[in-house]
Amino acid sequence: MANYADAQELAALRSLSASIGRDPHLTQAAGGNTSLKAGDTLWIKASGTWLKNALAEDIMVPVAIAPLLEAVEQRDPAADQPQAFAIEALNARKLRPSIETTVHALMPQRVVLHVHCVETISLAVQADCEGQLAKRLDGLEWAYVPYRRPGLPLAQGIAERLRPGVDVLILGNHGLVVAAETVAGAEALLRRVTGLLARPPREVVEPNVVALTALIGRTGYRLPADVEAHAAAIDPESCRMASGGSLYPDHVIFLGKGSVVARPGEDVPRVTERCGAAPVAILFPGAGVLMRGDASAGADAMQRCLADVTARVDVAAKLNYLTAAENDELINWDAEQYRQKLNAAGG
Ligand SMILES: [Zn+2]
Protein backbone atom coordinates (compact mmCIF):
# COMPACT_ATOMS: atom_id res chain seq x y z
CA MET A 1 0.00 0.00 0.00
CA ALA A 2 1.63 3.24 -1.23
CA ASN A 3 0.25 5.69 1.29
CA TYR A 4 1.39 5.52 4.92
CA ALA A 5 -1.90 6.96 6.29
CA ASP A 6 -3.87 4.31 4.35
CA ALA A 7 -1.60 1.56 5.68
CA GLN A 8 -2.19 2.80 9.24
CA GLU A 9 -5.96 2.82 8.72
CA LEU A 10 -5.85 -0.68 7.25
CA ALA A 11 -3.95 -1.88 10.33
CA ALA A 12 -6.57 -0.22 12.57
CA LEU A 13 -9.35 -1.81 10.51
CA ARG A 14 -7.80 -5.28 10.86
CA SER A 15 -7.66 -4.83 14.61
CA LEU A 16 -11.29 -3.63 14.79
CA SER A 17 -12.33 -6.48 12.44
CA ALA A 18 -10.79 -9.08 14.75
CA SER A 19 -12.64 -7.60 17.73
CA ILE A 20 -15.96 -7.50 15.82
CA GLY A 21 -15.33 -11.09 14.69
CA ARG A 22 -14.90 -12.27 18.28
CA ASP A 23 -18.30 -10.92 19.33
CA PRO A 24 -21.04 -13.45 18.50
CA HIS A 25 -23.63 -10.67 18.83
CA LEU A 26 -21.99 -8.86 15.89
CA THR A 27 -20.78 -11.63 13.55
CA GLN A 28 -21.07 -15.37 13.27
CA ALA A 29 -18.72 -17.67 11.34
CA ALA A 30 -17.64 -16.20 7.99
CA GLY A 31 -20.45 -13.62 8.12
CA GLY A 32 -19.93 -9.87 8.20
CA ASN A 33 -17.24 -7.93 6.39
CA THR A 34 -15.22 -4.73 6.62
CA SER A 35 -13.52 -2.52 4.06
CA LEU A 36 -11.28 0.50 3.49
CA LYS A 37 -11.10 2.64 0.35
CA ALA A 38 -7.55 3.75 -0.52
CA GLY A 39 -7.53 5.79 -3.68
CA ASP A 40 -9.11 3.70 -6.48
CA THR A 41 -8.82 0.48 -4.46
CA LEU A 42 -11.26 -1.11 -2.06
CA TRP A 43 -9.64 -3.43 0.51
CA ILE A 44 -12.37 -5.87 1.52
CA LYS A 45 -12.56 -9.03 3.59
CA ALA A 46 -12.16 -12.19 1.52
CA SER A 47 -15.11 -14.52 1.00
CA GLY A 48 -15.26 -17.48 3.39
CA THR A 49 -12.70 -16.03 5.83
CA TRP A 50 -13.62 -15.19 9.43
CA LEU A 51 -13.34 -11.61 10.69
CA LYS A 52 -11.98 -12.90 14.00
CA ASN A 53 -8.85 -14.02 12.07
CA ALA A 54 -8.24 -10.53 10.65
CA LEU A 55 -5.04 -10.01 12.66
CA ALA A 56 -3.68 -13.56 12.50
CA GLU A 57 -4.13 -13.93 8.71
CA ASP A 58 -4.14 -11.67 5.68
CA ILE A 59 -7.86 -11.72 4.86
CA MET A 60 -8.16 -8.42 2.95
CA VAL A 61 -8.41 -8.48 -0.86
CA PRO A 62 -7.85 -5.42 -3.14
CA VAL A 63 -10.65 -4.66 -5.62
CA ALA A 64 -10.85 -1.98 -8.35
CA ILE A 65 -13.77 0.26 -7.30
CA ALA A 66 -14.69 2.12 -10.50
CA PRO A 67 -15.25 -0.87 -12.82
CA LEU A 68 -17.24 -2.69 -10.09
CA LEU A 69 -19.54 0.32 -9.58
CA GLU A 70 -19.92 0.62 -13.34
CA ALA A 71 -21.03 -3.04 -13.48
CA VAL A 72 -23.62 -2.43 -10.70
CA GLU A 73 -24.97 0.59 -12.54
CA GLN A 74 -25.22 -1.35 -15.82
CA ARG A 75 -26.88 -4.26 -13.96
CA ASP A 76 -24.09 -6.37 -15.39
CA PRO A 77 -24.18 -9.91 -13.91
CA ALA A 78 -20.37 -9.56 -13.56
CA ALA A 79 -21.08 -7.47 -10.43
CA ASP A 80 -22.28 -10.72 -8.84
CA GLN A 81 -18.76 -12.16 -9.28
CA PRO A 82 -16.60 -9.57 -7.49
CA GLN A 83 -13.49 -11.76 -7.99
CA ALA A 84 -13.47 -10.47 -11.59
CA PHE A 85 -12.59 -7.04 -10.13
CA ALA A 86 -9.83 -8.18 -7.73
CA ILE A 87 -6.44 -6.59 -8.39
CA GLU A 88 -4.51 -9.82 -8.86
CA ALA A 89 -1.04 -8.24 -8.70
CA LEU A 90 -1.76 -7.29 -5.05
CA ASN A 91 -3.78 -10.43 -4.19
CA ALA A 92 -0.98 -12.71 -3.03
CA ARG A 93 -3.25 -15.36 -1.48
CA LYS A 94 -5.54 -15.43 -4.54
CA LEU A 95 -8.60 -15.06 -2.31
CA ARG A 96 -11.99 -14.00 -3.64
CA PRO A 97 -13.45 -10.73 -2.36
CA SER A 98 -16.59 -11.02 -0.23
CA ILE A 99 -19.88 -11.73 -1.95
CA GLU A 100 -21.01 -8.46 -0.36
CA THR A 101 -18.24 -6.33 -1.93
CA THR A 102 -20.79 -4.26 -3.86
CA VAL A 103 -22.40 -3.12 -0.57
CA HIS A 104 -19.06 -1.59 0.45
CA ALA A 105 -18.30 -0.10 -2.97
CA LEU A 106 -21.68 1.68 -3.06
CA MET A 107 -21.10 3.52 0.21
CA PRO A 108 -19.04 6.66 -0.55
CA GLN A 109 -17.36 6.77 2.89
CA ARG A 110 -13.80 5.40 3.27
CA VAL A 111 -14.51 2.83 5.97
CA VAL A 112 -17.50 0.46 5.86
CA LEU A 113 -18.48 -2.15 8.46
CA HIS A 114 -21.17 -4.73 7.67
CA VAL A 115 -22.26 -6.93 10.55
CA HIS A 116 -24.91 -9.56 11.20
CA CYS A 117 -25.65 -7.90 14.50
CA VAL A 118 -28.29 -9.84 16.47
CA GLU A 119 -29.88 -6.59 17.75
CA THR A 120 -30.33 -5.42 14.15
CA ILE A 121 -31.48 -8.75 12.74
CA SER A 122 -34.04 -9.20 15.52
CA LEU A 123 -35.68 -5.93 14.41
CA ALA A 124 -35.04 -6.49 10.70
CA VAL A 125 -37.19 -9.66 10.72
CA GLN A 126 -40.20 -7.87 12.20
CA ALA A 127 -42.84 -6.70 9.71
CA ASP A 128 -43.06 -3.38 11.64
CA CYS A 129 -39.28 -2.87 11.36
CA GLU A 130 -39.32 0.52 9.62
CA GLY A 131 -41.57 2.11 12.25
CA GLN A 132 -39.44 0.68 15.07
CA LEU A 133 -36.28 1.99 13.42
CA ALA A 134 -37.76 5.46 12.94
CA LYS A 135 -38.33 5.68 16.70
CA ARG A 136 -34.91 4.36 17.68
CA LEU A 137 -32.67 5.95 15.04
CA ASP A 138 -34.20 9.45 15.08
CA GLY A 139 -31.45 11.98 14.40
CA LEU A 140 -29.23 9.58 12.45
CA GLU A 141 -28.93 9.48 8.64
CA TRP A 142 -30.21 5.96 8.07
CA ALA A 143 -32.01 4.05 5.32
CA TYR A 144 -33.93 0.78 5.35
CA VAL A 145 -33.33 -1.62 2.47
CA PRO A 146 -35.92 -4.39 2.05
CA TYR A 147 -34.59 -7.96 1.77
CA ARG A 148 -32.78 -8.92 -1.43
CA ARG A 149 -30.40 -11.78 -2.02
CA PRO A 150 -26.83 -10.62 -1.17
CA GLY A 151 -24.79 -9.73 -4.27
CA LEU A 152 -26.12 -7.79 -7.24
CA PRO A 153 -29.81 -7.85 -6.15
CA LEU A 154 -28.93 -6.36 -2.74
CA ALA A 155 -26.59 -3.81 -4.38
CA GLN A 156 -29.49 -2.64 -6.56
CA GLY A 157 -31.77 -2.46 -3.53
CA ILE A 158 -29.21 -0.27 -1.73
CA ALA A 159 -28.68 1.96 -4.77
CA GLU A 160 -32.47 2.62 -4.81
CA ARG A 161 -32.54 3.69 -1.14
CA LEU A 162 -29.19 5.47 -0.74
CA ARG A 163 -29.37 9.26 -0.25
CA PRO A 164 -26.46 11.68 0.15
CA GLY A 165 -25.29 11.69 3.77
CA VAL A 166 -26.67 8.26 4.69
CA ASP A 167 -24.13 6.37 6.79
CA VAL A 168 -26.35 3.69 8.38
CA LEU A 169 -28.19 0.99 6.43
CA ILE A 170 -30.56 -1.52 7.97
CA LEU A 171 -30.82 -4.48 5.61
CA GLY A 172 -34.16 -6.26 5.94
CA ASN A 173 -33.81 -9.88 7.21
CA HIS A 174 -30.06 -9.46 7.11
CA GLY A 175 -28.07 -6.94 9.17
CA LEU A 176 -26.41 -3.58 9.56
CA VAL A 177 -24.01 -1.40 7.55
CA VAL A 178 -22.27 1.64 9.05
CA ALA A 179 -19.82 3.90 7.22
CA ALA A 180 -17.46 6.73 8.17
CA GLU A 181 -14.31 8.46 6.98
CA THR A 182 -12.12 6.84 9.66
CA VAL A 183 -11.96 3.46 11.40
CA ALA A 184 -12.48 5.18 14.76
CA GLY A 185 -15.55 7.01 13.40
CA ALA A 186 -17.02 3.79 11.99
CA GLU A 187 -16.46 1.96 15.28
CA ALA A 188 -18.14 4.77 17.25
CA LEU A 189 -21.14 4.73 14.88
CA LEU A 190 -21.40 0.94 15.14
CA ARG A 191 -21.48 1.14 18.96
CA ARG A 192 -24.03 3.96 18.86
CA VAL A 193 -26.43 2.17 16.48
CA THR A 194 -26.20 -1.22 18.17
CA GLY A 195 -26.84 0.54 21.49
CA LEU A 196 -29.94 2.26 20.11
CA LEU A 197 -31.29 -1.01 18.67
CA ALA A 198 -30.54 -3.14 21.73
CA ARG A 199 -33.39 -4.97 23.45
CA PRO A 200 -33.02 -7.30 26.42
CA PRO A 201 -33.27 -11.01 25.53
CA ARG A 202 -35.99 -13.06 27.21
CA GLU A 203 -34.58 -15.08 30.09
CA VAL A 204 -34.47 -18.85 29.67
CA VAL A 205 -34.01 -21.80 31.96
CA GLU A 206 -31.06 -24.20 31.60
CA PRO A 207 -31.13 -26.91 28.91
CA ASN A 208 -32.21 -30.38 30.01
CA VAL A 209 -28.83 -32.03 29.45
CA VAL A 210 -29.99 -35.35 30.91
CA ALA A 211 -32.82 -35.61 28.38
CA LEU A 212 -30.56 -34.42 25.54
CA THR A 213 -27.85 -36.94 26.45
CA ALA A 214 -30.44 -39.71 26.40
CA LEU A 215 -31.62 -38.51 22.98
CA ILE A 216 -28.02 -38.50 21.66
CA GLY A 217 -27.56 -42.22 22.49
CA ARG A 218 -25.76 -43.72 19.50
CA THR A 219 -27.19 -41.30 16.93
CA GLY A 220 -23.91 -39.46 16.29
CA TYR A 221 -25.56 -36.18 17.27
CA ARG A 222 -23.91 -33.94 19.87
CA LEU A 223 -24.56 -30.91 22.07
CA PRO A 224 -24.05 -27.50 20.40
CA ALA A 225 -20.68 -25.73 20.79
CA ASP A 226 -22.31 -22.84 22.69
CA VAL A 227 -24.71 -23.45 25.59
CA GLU A 228 -26.57 -20.27 24.50
CA ALA A 229 -27.81 -22.10 21.37
CA HIS A 230 -30.33 -24.15 23.42
CA ALA A 231 -32.53 -21.11 24.11
CA ALA A 232 -34.12 -21.36 20.64
CA ALA A 233 -35.65 -24.69 21.72
CA ILE A 234 -36.21 -23.98 25.41
CA ASP A 235 -38.10 -20.68 25.13
CA PRO A 236 -41.57 -21.43 23.70
CA GLU A 237 -41.79 -18.08 21.87
CA SER A 238 -38.33 -18.48 20.31
CA CYS A 239 -39.17 -22.05 19.30
CA ARG A 240 -42.42 -20.86 17.69
CA MET A 241 -40.50 -18.17 15.73
CA ALA A 242 -37.84 -20.68 14.64
CA SER A 243 -40.44 -23.21 13.51
CA GLY A 244 -41.98 -20.64 11.14
CA GLY A 245 -39.15 -20.78 8.59
CA SER A 246 -35.89 -19.06 7.63
CA LEU A 247 -35.36 -15.55 8.97
CA TYR A 248 -32.05 -14.47 7.33
CA PRO A 249 -29.67 -15.75 4.62
CA ASP A 250 -26.75 -17.20 6.62
CA HIS A 251 -29.20 -19.41 8.51
CA VAL A 252 -30.19 -21.06 5.22
CA ILE A 253 -26.59 -21.34 4.05
CA PHE A 254 -25.23 -23.01 7.19
CA LEU A 255 -28.29 -24.82 8.60
CA GLY A 256 -30.62 -25.31 5.63
CA LYS A 257 -34.18 -24.07 5.16
CA GLY A 258 -35.93 -23.18 8.40
CA SER A 259 -35.52 -25.16 11.59
CA VAL A 260 -36.41 -28.75 12.37
CA VAL A 261 -38.45 -28.97 15.57
CA ALA A 262 -39.08 -32.41 17.08
CA ARG A 263 -42.75 -33.26 17.61
CA PRO A 264 -43.94 -34.64 20.97
CA GLY A 265 -42.43 -38.10 21.54
CA GLU A 266 -40.07 -37.93 18.56
CA ASP A 267 -36.43 -38.94 19.00
CA VAL A 268 -33.54 -38.38 16.56
CA PRO A 269 -34.26 -41.43 14.31
CA ARG A 270 -37.96 -40.51 14.07
CA VAL A 271 -37.17 -36.89 13.18
CA THR A 272 -34.64 -38.08 10.56
CA GLU A 273 -37.21 -40.46 9.09
CA ARG A 274 -39.86 -37.73 8.88
CA CYS A 275 -37.38 -35.29 7.23
CA GLY A 276 -35.96 -37.87 4.84
CA ALA A 277 -32.40 -36.93 5.88
CA ALA A 278 -30.54 -36.18 9.12
CA PRO A 279 -30.98 -32.44 9.83
CA VAL A 280 -27.89 -30.38 10.74
CA ALA A 281 -29.71 -29.32 13.94
CA ILE A 282 -32.84 -30.49 15.77
CA LEU A 283 -34.75 -28.40 18.30
CA PHE A 284 -36.32 -30.41 21.13
CA PRO A 285 -38.91 -28.04 22.65
CA GLY A 286 -38.32 -27.37 26.32
CA ALA A 287 -35.11 -29.45 26.37
CA GLY A 288 -32.56 -27.91 24.00
CA VAL A 289 -30.79 -28.38 20.67
CA LEU A 290 -28.78 -31.25 19.19
CA MET A 291 -26.30 -30.82 16.33
CA ARG A 292 -25.41 -33.54 13.81
CA GLY A 293 -21.93 -34.88 14.62
CA ASP A 294 -20.38 -33.44 11.43
CA ALA A 295 -21.98 -29.98 11.75
CA SER A 296 -19.41 -27.29 10.92
CA ALA A 297 -18.20 -24.54 13.25
CA GLY A 298 -20.25 -22.20 11.05
CA ALA A 299 -23.41 -24.24 11.67
CA ASP A 300 -22.81 -24.04 15.43
CA ALA A 301 -22.31 -20.27 15.21
CA MET A 302 -25.54 -19.87 13.24
CA GLN A 303 -27.53 -22.10 15.63
CA ARG A 304 -26.45 -19.87 18.50
CA CYS A 305 -27.32 -16.80 16.40
CA LEU A 306 -30.87 -18.10 16.00
CA ALA A 307 -31.25 -18.24 19.78
CA ASP A 308 -29.74 -14.77 20.23
CA VAL A 309 -31.98 -13.25 17.52
CA THR A 310 -35.29 -14.87 18.46
CA ALA A 311 -34.79 -14.08 22.17
CA ARG A 312 -34.87 -10.35 21.27
CA VAL A 313 -37.83 -10.34 18.86
CA ASP A 314 -41.04 -8.78 20.17
CA VAL A 315 -43.35 -11.75 20.89
CA ALA A 316 -46.33 -9.80 19.52
CA ALA A 317 -44.58 -8.92 16.24
CA LYS A 318 -45.56 -10.36 12.88
CA LEU A 319 -42.41 -11.81 11.30
CA ASN A 320 -41.16 -11.61 7.73
CA TYR A 321 -39.81 -15.03 6.75
CA LEU A 322 -37.81 -15.67 3.59
CA THR A 323 -40.09 -17.02 0.86
CA ALA A 324 -39.63 -20.47 -0.71
CA ALA A 325 -38.05 -18.81 -3.77
CA GLU A 326 -35.68 -16.77 -1.56
CA ASN A 327 -34.63 -19.95 0.28
CA ASP A 328 -34.00 -21.76 -3.01
CA GLU A 329 -31.89 -18.99 -4.55
CA LEU A 330 -29.60 -19.10 -1.50
CA ILE A 331 -29.23 -22.88 -1.58
CA ASN A 332 -28.50 -23.00 -5.32
CA TRP A 333 -26.04 -20.14 -5.38
CA ASP A 334 -22.49 -21.01 -6.43
CA ALA A 335 -20.77 -18.07 -4.76
CA GLU A 336 -22.17 -19.44 -1.50
CA GLN A 337 -21.10 -22.98 -2.28
CA TYR A 338 -17.54 -21.61 -2.62
CA ARG A 339 -17.83 -19.79 0.72
CA GLN A 340 -19.07 -22.94 2.45
CA LYS A 341 -16.21 -24.98 1.03
CA LEU A 342 -13.69 -22.51 2.49
CA ASN A 343 -15.64 -22.47 5.75
CA ALA A 344 -15.47 -26.26 5.99
CA ALA A 345 -11.73 -26.16 5.27
CA GLY A 346 -10.76 -23.20 7.45
CA GLY A 347 -13.38 -22.90 10.22
ZN1 LIG B 1 -24.32 -9.84 5.21
Image: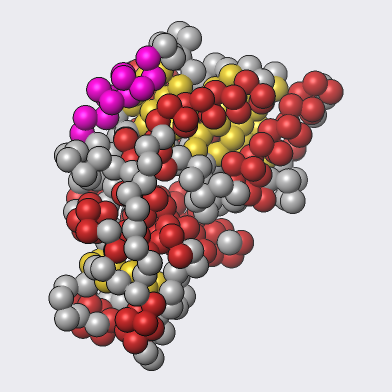
Is residue 131 covered in magenta? yes
Nearer to me, 23 or 91:
23
User: Whole-percent x and y of residue 194?
Assistant: 47, 32
Q: How is the image coloured?
A: secondary structure
Q: Is residue 68 left or right of residue 315?
A: right
Q: Quadrant of residue 253?
A: bottom left
Q: Which residue is depicted at the point 79% across and 28% down?
A: 7
User: Whole-percent x and y of residue 87?
Assistant: 67, 34
Q: Quadrant of residue 186?
A: top right
**Is residue 100 positioned above or below 228 on the image?**
above
* Image quadrant where one finds the N terminus: top right
Q: Which residue is depicted at the point 59% across and 35% down?
A: 34
Magenta segment, which residues?
Answer: 127-138
Q: Is residue 279 visible?
A: no
Nearer to me, 296 or 152:
296
Q: Is residue 306 left or right of residue 27?
A: left
Q: Quadrant of residue 185?
A: top right
Is residue 111 covered in magenta? no
Q: Taken as a whole, is the magenta stretch helix, strand or loop?
A: helix
* Image quadrant where one finds the C terminus: bottom right
Q: Which residue is depicted at the point 32% across and 49% down?
A: 202
User: Whole-percent x and y of residue 256?
Assistant: 32, 60
Q: Is residue 338 left or right of residue 278?
A: right
